[in-house]
Image (spheres, rainbow, N blue to C red):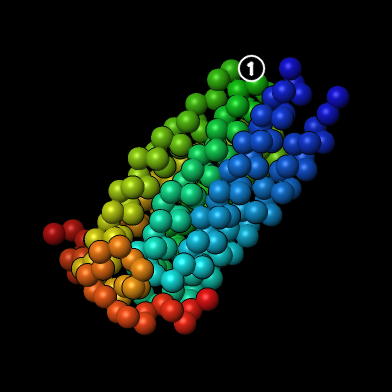
Amino acid sequence: MLDGNLLAITLKIAFVLVSLASLFSLIRLIAGPSIPDRILALDTLYVNSIALIILYGIQQGSALYFEAALLIAVMGFVGTLALSKYLMRGDIME
Amino acid sequence: MLDILEIVVSILLLIGALFTCLGSLALVKLPDFFMRLHGPTKASTLGTGAILLASAIYFSFKTSDISVHEILITVFLFITAPVSAHMIAKAALHLKIKQNRRTRHPIHYDERYGEEEP
């Protein structure tokens, strides 16, 4: 009955909203007054890019993109942790 | 059956995209770092979790075997988001970031900080 039209329209709306979210994080990343603001904006950008990659995978109908999303999730977590640790201690590995 | 699947996936996608957008809008709009921390750590994580759940349901019914990758990413995100938020907040407290008057229990308190920003 619906033959894929609803999902295509919803995917387009979701792409627009998540791209808008990435744009907002980019604004905070550029204009953030302090360094923790920028780290937080970078972390949000990682999460938004995971959402974008998953949306692209649904649109292409291919299950190949999850490994990239998982890698981005792991690397984003490690990067955020390392940056916060560097701000706190002045050193990453003690 | 396929229509119900499509409607469920579309609703989950819309909820996820809306929450992700709201979380990043909070990151731009709120006046203080400790207020800004709330948006991405809760709303964006929930939104991305909903999008991942929609993808899991879609690919589970499309390829007729259960797709576990998305559940893995969801669990990983839900575990790591509070940890990274805690670390960023500790770094901000250590750096003595200026706080707005309306932040709860302000330590490094500044009367006019963040008032002139939109």
Type of the residue with mark 1: Ser
Q: Position of residue B88 (x, y in %)?
A: 31, 60
Q: Chain of mark 1?
A: B
Does residue B90 lie above or below B76 as drawn? below
Horizontal side, residue B114 vs residue B28: left or right: left
Which residue is depicted at the point 63% across and 17% down?
Answer: B64
Check the image and name the residue furthest to the right: A1
| Residue drawn at the location 25% of the way across and 64% of the way down | B105
Q: Position of residue A57 (x, y in %)?
A: 64, 40
Q: Residues within 10 Å of mark 1 (few under 14, many from 20)?
A: few
- Write the residue at 71% across / 43% down: A11
Left or right, A17 with respect to A31, comes to right
Q: Nearer the viewer, residue B14 or A80?
A: B14
Lateral position of residue A11 relative to residue A29, left or right? right
Q: Secondary structure at mark 1?
A: loop
Residue underneath mark 1: B64
Q: Total number of numbered labels?
A: 1
Query: In the rendered image, is residue A39 in sight?
Result: no
Above-or-below relation of B63 to A6: above
The spot of residue A72 in percent (x, y) is 46, 49
User: Residue, x 55% and y 38% (percent of image)?
Assistant: B50
- Viewer-nearest residue: A46 or A20: A20
Res. B52 image quadrant = top right
